[in-house]
């Protein structure tokens, strides 16, 4: 049976635009590994489509990109797509939510409802980008500092590593970027970026079974 990856990619503001384009890199990588991909871009990242796809296709790895809160993950135009009320739809799945704060309560609830593992952030995920690169986000070296470590996590999961190891790989990528920014040639601006990277790394958490794998 083919492994199936599910991903949402809303795209209605600068932040979701960046997350969507970096999410496309995860899709490309998954396809090279023979993974079946269920992609819900832009307006398809709606509550109706998310619930329908999860129920009918039953993917084992679920990736959410979008805004969030302690008890909500949103889709296109910030429509709530996963909340405490429908979190049981993620039962038996490995989830990575690139979404502010959702691991604080929603992630805990998902695991209580039977999700294998929930990887996410228990506070805001800070993303710094260069506004002049908004039309070509993959060329934005500042955003790359934040989003490459996130993709390191998704790539590691796709390779079959455990959730715990995937998180370690992501945090190692964060540390590498932090060290680069704090080198002897670092500017005051670099030091500021390093602080934000440290924040994201510290607030990335793995709930549930750390040994689950895709």
Image (cartoon, rainbow, N blue to C red):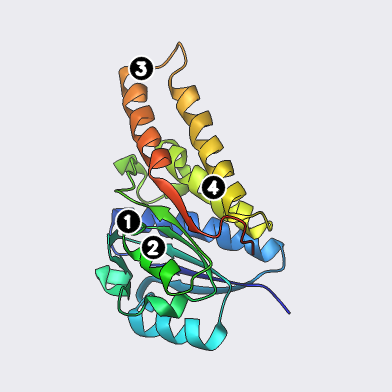
Along the viewing direction, whichever of 131 and 196 lies nearer the viewer:
196
On the image, numbered disc 3 is attached to which residue? 187
| Category of crowding for the residue at label 1, using alpha-carbon neighbours closer than 10 angstroms: few (below 14), some (14–19), many (at least 20) | some
Regarding residue 6, the answer to whether it shows in the image is yes
Left or right position of 74 against 94? left
Choose between 126 and 29: the one closer to the eye: 126
Determine which of the numbered discs, if any, sits on residue 167 in the image.
4
Residue 82 placed where, x, y %?
A: 34, 73
Q: CA distance from mark 2 to mark 4?
A: 15 Å
For this rendering, which residue is in front, 152 or 39?
152
Q: Is residue 157 above or below residue 10?
A: above
For residue 104, the mark is: 1
Instruction: Indicate the quadrant containing the N terminus: top left, top right, bottom left or bottom right.
Output: bottom right
Which of disc 1 and disc 4 is earlier in sequence?
A: 1
Q: Is residue 143 visible?
A: no
Image side of residue 48 versus residue 151, left or right: left
Image height of 18 relative to 184, above or below: below
Give the residue displayed 26% in from the left and 73% down from the top.
79
Q: Pointer 1 and pointer 2: residues touching (CB < 8 Å)?
A: yes
The residue where tag 2 is placed is: 107
Question: Which element carries disc 4, helix, strand or loop?
Answer: helix
For label 1, the SS is loop
Helix, strand or loop under label 3 = loop
Marking on residue 36: none
Q: For the residues marked 3 and 4, what is the alpha-carbon distance in whole angstroms? A: 29 Å
Q: Could you tell whether 123 is left or right of 177 in the image?
A: left
**Helix, strand or loop under label 2:** helix
């Amino acid at each position: 049976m083919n492994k199936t990856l599910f991903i949402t990619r809303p795209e209605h503001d600068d932040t979701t635009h960046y997350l969507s384009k970096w999410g496309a890199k995860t899709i490309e990588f998954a396809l090279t590994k023979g993974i079946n991909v269920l992609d819900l871009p832009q307006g398809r990242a709606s509550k109706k489509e998310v619930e329908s796809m999860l129920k009918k296709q039953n993917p084992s790895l679920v990736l959410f990109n979008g805004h969030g809160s302690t008890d909500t993950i949103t889709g296109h135009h910030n429509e709530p797509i996963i909340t405490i009320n429908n979190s049981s739809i993620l039962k038996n799945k490995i989830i990575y939510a690139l979404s502010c704060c959702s691991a604080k309560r929603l992630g805990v609830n998902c695991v209580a409802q039977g999700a294998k593992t929930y990887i996410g952030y228990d506070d805001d995920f800070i993303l710094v980008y260069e506004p002049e690169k908004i039309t070509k986000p993959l060329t934005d070296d500042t955003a790359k500092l934040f989003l490459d470590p996130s993709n390191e996590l998704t790539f590691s999961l796709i390779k079959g590593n455990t959730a715990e190891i995937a998180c370690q790989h992501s945090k190692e990528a964060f540390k590498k970027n932090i060290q680069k920014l704090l080198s002897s040639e670092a500017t005051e601006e670099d030091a500021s970026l390093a602080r934000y990277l440290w924040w994201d790394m510290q607030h990335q958490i793995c709930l549930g079974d750390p040994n689950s794998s895709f």
